[in-house]
Amino acid sequence: MTRTRHPGAEPFLPSKRGVRALRAAVRDCRGCDLYRAAGQAVFGAGPRDAELMLVGEQPGDVEDRTGNPFTGPAGRVLDRALNELGLDRDRLYLTNAVKHFRFRARGKRRIHQRPTLGQTVACRPWLDAELEAVQPAGIVLLGSLAGQSLLGSDYRVGDHRGRLLELPGVDAWVVATVHPSAALRADDREAVHAGLVDDLRLAADRLARS
C-alpha cells in the first residue's frame, strides 16, 4: 500500500499573516492526514495584541465540535486556575500546537489520541505564524506535546516547569506546565490543579513586571 504524502502546513498559509487571515486559511489545511476525520480545524482565539499566549496540545472532542480552543472539560479546569490568579481569559490568546483533533472511535465516543511527531511537525507553521502575528511577551506551554513542538523532542514538563525558559528565535519568555486535562486524569486532582496554578502564577508574576 502506498502512503499518501502530505506537504505540511506551509503551502496553506496565506500571504497575509494576520490572525484573521490565518484563521480563515486554516479551514482548508491539508498539511497532514488529520483533516480527514476531524470535524474542523480549531485555530487560536484571543486578542491579536495579547501579552500572554497559552499553547495546548490539540483540540478535544468538544473543541472539534465548537471550533474554539479550550471549551471542553480541560478548558473548565484552565478557567478555574486563571480565575484563582485573577487572569482574564478574554485578554489571553489560547491556541494548540496541532489544529485538528486526533481520535479513535469507540461506538459513538471519540477517544483522544496523541498526534504523531509527523503530524505535530506538519502543523508547526501555523503556530509559528500565530507567534509572529500576536508577538506575546510570554508563552505558557500546556503539556508535553506543546513543549516538544516548540522546544524539541527532549522537552519534559517535569524537567522544565517552575522556571522561566527561552524559546530560540522568539522574543518572549516561556513557562512550562502540565496540560489542564492532567487534573482530570489524576488520582489527586487538587494537587495537580495546585501545581498548574503555581506554574501559571510564575507567568502572571512575570507578566506583571513587563
Image (cartoon, helix red, strand yellow):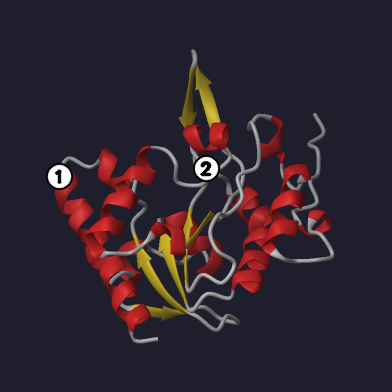
Closer to the chain start, of discs 2 and 1, is 2
* Residue type for callout 2: Pro
Is residue 132 visible in the rendered structure shown here? yes
Query: x%, y% of residue 104?
Result: 53, 26
Q: Nearer the viewer, residue 148 or 96?
A: 96
| Residue most extreme to the bottom | 209
Q: Is residue 194 left or right of residue 179?
A: left
Is residue 30 visible to the viewer in this orientation of the structure?
A: no
- Between circles 2 and 1, the one closer to the viewer is 2
Element type at marker 1?
loop
Q: Is residue 109 left or right of residue 179?
A: right
Residue depicted at 59% across the width and 52% down the height: 117
> Badge 2: few (under 14), some or many (20 or more) residues near its Cα, within 10 Å?
many
Percent from the top left, x then y, of residue 36? Answer: 71, 32
- Element under label 2? loop
Name the residue beneath numbered marker 2: 59
Q: Residues within 10 Å of mark 1 (few under 14, many from 20)?
A: few
Q: Residue at x 48, y 38 (%)?
A: 60
Indicate left or right for 206 with 34 as reference. left
Instruction: Say left or right for 105 vs 208.
Output: right
Looking at the rendered structure, the kind of residue marked 1 is: Asp
- Residue closer to the observer: 40 or 169: 40
Q: How many marks?
A: 2
116 vs 201, nearest the viewer: 201
Label 1 belongs to which residue? 188
Distance from the alpha carbon under mark 2 to that under mark 1: 24 Å
Q: Are marks 2 and 1 in contact (CB under 8 Å)?
A: no
Residue 71 position, x and y percent, is 44, 41
- In the image, 91 versus 95, the foreground residue is 91
Residue 190 locus on image (x, y percent):
15, 48
* Residue 3 position (above or below residue 7): above
